[in-house]
Image (cartoon, grey):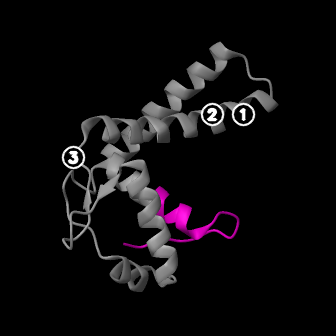
Amino acid sequence: MNVSFNKRDPVYLQVVRQFKERIATGSFEPGQEIPSRRELANQLKINPNTAQRAYKEMEEEGLIYTEGNNPSRITKDEHVLAAVRGELLEEAVDSFITSIRRIQVPFDELVEVMKESYQRQSEEEGGK
């Protein structure tokens, strides 16, 4: 797992975000075993306490679970998995809308530009 950390957000929240993105894209499968806290800390070169805090946060959100002394796993709860994708989508759209409103783009123009950009990027990805 490769992560570039920014300096403005707490590292543990950035780790949680990475897990959410991997869950939403299917890189992490439901029920998949994940690295131990210590392994994750070593992989990401972060403090073990930071990894512990990220796992605690993910357990509280229901993203992962740990049974006894077994390794932690990605949740199998379909509602949680769907909510992760919805949360990431909503955050991206809110950020985008905030940016666009500053330059006062009319809604119809915005929708047309989004369609064109989406199609162009889809074609570029298909051509790779």
Is label 2 in a helix, a strand or a loop? Answer: helix
Q: What distance separates the C-alpha of mark 1 from that of mark 2? A: 6 Å
Query: Which numbered circle lies on residue 94?
Result: 2
In the current view of this chain or complex, which residue is farthest to the front? 68
Tag 2: amino acid: Asp
Q: Residue 31 falls in which quadrant of the image? A: bottom left
Is label 3 in a helix, a strand or a loop? Answer: loop
10 Å crowding of disc 2: few (<14), some (14-19), many (20+): few
Q: Earlier in the sequence, mark 3 or mark 1?
A: 3
Q: Residue 43 falls in which quadrant of the image? A: bottom left
Tag 3: amino acid: Lys
Q: Which residues are magenta?
A: 1-17
Image location of residue 60, percent across then percent down? 43, 53
Task: Tell me: 110 left or right of 115.
Answer: right
Give whichever of 92, 100 is nearer the camera: 92
Q: What distance separates the C-alpha of mark 3 from that of mark 1? A: 34 Å
Q: Which residue occupies 50% across, 79% down?
A: 49
Query: Which numbered circle lies on residue 5?
Result: none
User: Relative to residue 53, is residue 44 depicted above or below?
Assistant: below
10 Å crowding of disc 1: few (<14), some (14-19), many (20+): few
Image location of residue 78, percent across then percent down? 25, 37
Give whichever of 3, 9 is nearer the camera: 9
Q: What distance separates the C-alpha of mark 3 from that of mark 2? A: 28 Å
Q: Which residue is mark 3?
A: 76
| Nearer to us: label 3 or label 2 | 3
Q: Which residue is mark 1?
A: 98
Q: Are marks 1 and 2 in contact (CB under 8 Å)?
A: yes
- Total number of numbered labels? 3
Tag 1: amino acid: Thr
Image location of residue 67, percent across then percent down? 21, 63
